[in-house]
Each structure stands twice: as C-alpha cells, then as structure tokens.
C-alpha cells in the first residue's frame, strides 16, 4: 500500500480527480510521455487521504474504494483512509480556461498553459465546455472517467459527443490535427 499526500485546492471541499491522477504518476514514478493505455475513474468524492493498492484481494471493502487506475503496466485501486485532508492550496481554474478557445462543440487547449499538468488542463477545459453548452446555473459537472491511449505532449482538443443515459457526458480527446487518443466522461448534479 502506498500512501498519497493529497491536498484540497481552491474552495473545493473534496479532492480533485486531477490531484489523485497526478499523485499516482508521482508515486509510481511514471513519465507522462511514456504511459500507455490509461483507464482512470472516480467512483465518488472524498475529503480524506488515500492510498494506492496494487496487489489486492477480492475481499477489499468496496465502500473504501473511491477510484480505479490502470495502464499498460498494471491496475491500482484508490482506497480512502480515515484521515481528513487539512492542507489547502490556491487554485485558479480560469488561468487554464482563459487560454482555451471554444468552437461549436470543441474546446482547444493550447500548449502555452504549461504550468499545469495534462489532467488539470483536460478536466478544467471539458468542464468549461459543458458549462458553455449546457449552462452552469444549476449544473455541477464532475469528472467520472478517462480512457487514453497516451498522454499528449502539447496542444490537444476535446469535442463533446453525447449524453449517455441522460446523465453522463462523453467527449473525445484528439491531438490537434484530429487523431483520436481517448475519451472523457463527466457526470452532473442538478441543484
């Protein structure tokens, strides 16, 4: 079991999926440019520290599992611990989204947003695309799943594709130029 050191960001009262994803890459000492066949999903929100389990038995308490990660090198379960997260850092999502451009159902994320990780840019950009297409008033969009052939270096696009079962918003991730490299899924809570 490998313990993560997670922080809350901005005004959120939960850990961002991007923070968990980046922590997995750090703990496993993975180079973004070399990871292949990624499947990352979050089952629920948490405001507690987490651990990664690579060798697990079927008798894991399913209620403690908050997410799953898999790539070409293996599978991981993300397990919630009892300790609440007490450290918080500022986070200005607009620093990412102000650099992006939207055309119809596609958002383009330029390479110039370099100080943020791929997953931070991906999640922030897709959320703002959904808010633009469906409105932000009364809609709380949140990350559910990412499937990805590889992590692109540089610019990329996300195109909204469809709503699945009236509650999941699927988008296609392409390297600029149109080559599909993955899919992203968000859920929505209505208020």
Image (cartoon, rainbow, N blue to C red):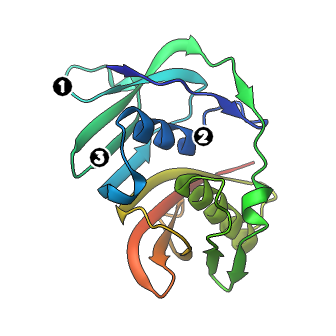
Note whether 66 is above or below 106 in the view shown.
above
What residue would you read off at disc 3? 70
Q: Earlier in the sequence, mark 3 or mark 1?
A: 1
Residue 76 occupies quadrant:
top left
Q: CA distance from mark 3 to mark 2?
A: 18 Å
* Depth order, front residue of 77/1: 1
Residue 147 occupies quadrant:
bottom left
Looking at the rendered structure, the secondary structure element under dot 2 is: loop
Which mark is nearer the camera, 3 or 1? 3
**Circle 1 residues within 10 Å: few <14, some 14–19, many ≥20:** few
Q: Which quadrant of the rendered structure holds the N terminus?
A: top left
What residue would you read off at disc 2? 16
Q: Is 77 situated left or right of 184 in this image?
A: left
Looking at the rendered structure, the secondary structure element under dot 3 is: strand
Note whether 61 is above or below 54 in the view shown.
above
Cβ–Cβ under 8 Å for marks 3 and 1: no
Q: Is 108 situated left or right of 131 in this image?
A: left
Q: Earlier in the sequence, mark 1 or mark 2?
A: 2
Q: Residue at x 17, y 23 (%)?
A: 57
What residue would you read off at disc 1? 58
Q: Residue at x 63, y 28 (%)?
A: 7
Q: Earlier in the sequence, mark 3 or mark 2?
A: 2
Looking at the rendered structure, the secondary structure element under dot 1 is: loop
């Amino acid at each position: 079991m490998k313990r993560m050191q997670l922080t809350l960001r901005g005004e959120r009262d939960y850990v961002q999926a991007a923070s968990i994803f980046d922590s997995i890459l750090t703990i496993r000492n993975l180079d973004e440019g070399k990871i292949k066949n990624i499947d990352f999903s979050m089952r629920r929100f948490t405001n507690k520290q987490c651990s990664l389990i690579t060798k697990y038995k079927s008798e894991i308490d399913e209620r403690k599992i908050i997410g799953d990660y898999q790539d070409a090198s293996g599978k991981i379960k993300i397990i919630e611990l009892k300790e609440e997260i007490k450290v918080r850092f500022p986070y200005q999502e607009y620093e990412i989204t102000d650099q992006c451009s939207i055309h119809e159902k596609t958002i383009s994320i330029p390479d110039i947003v370099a100080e943020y990780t791929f997953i931070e840019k991906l999640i922030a950009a897709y959320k703002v695309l959904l808010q633009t297409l469906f409105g932000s008033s009364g809609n709380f969009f949140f990350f559910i799943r990412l499937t990805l052939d590889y992590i692109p270096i540089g610019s990329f696009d996300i195109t909204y594709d469809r709503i699945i079962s009236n509650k999941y918003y699927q988008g296609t991730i392409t390297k600029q130029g149109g080559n599909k490299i993955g899919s992203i899924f968000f859920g929505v809570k209505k208020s």
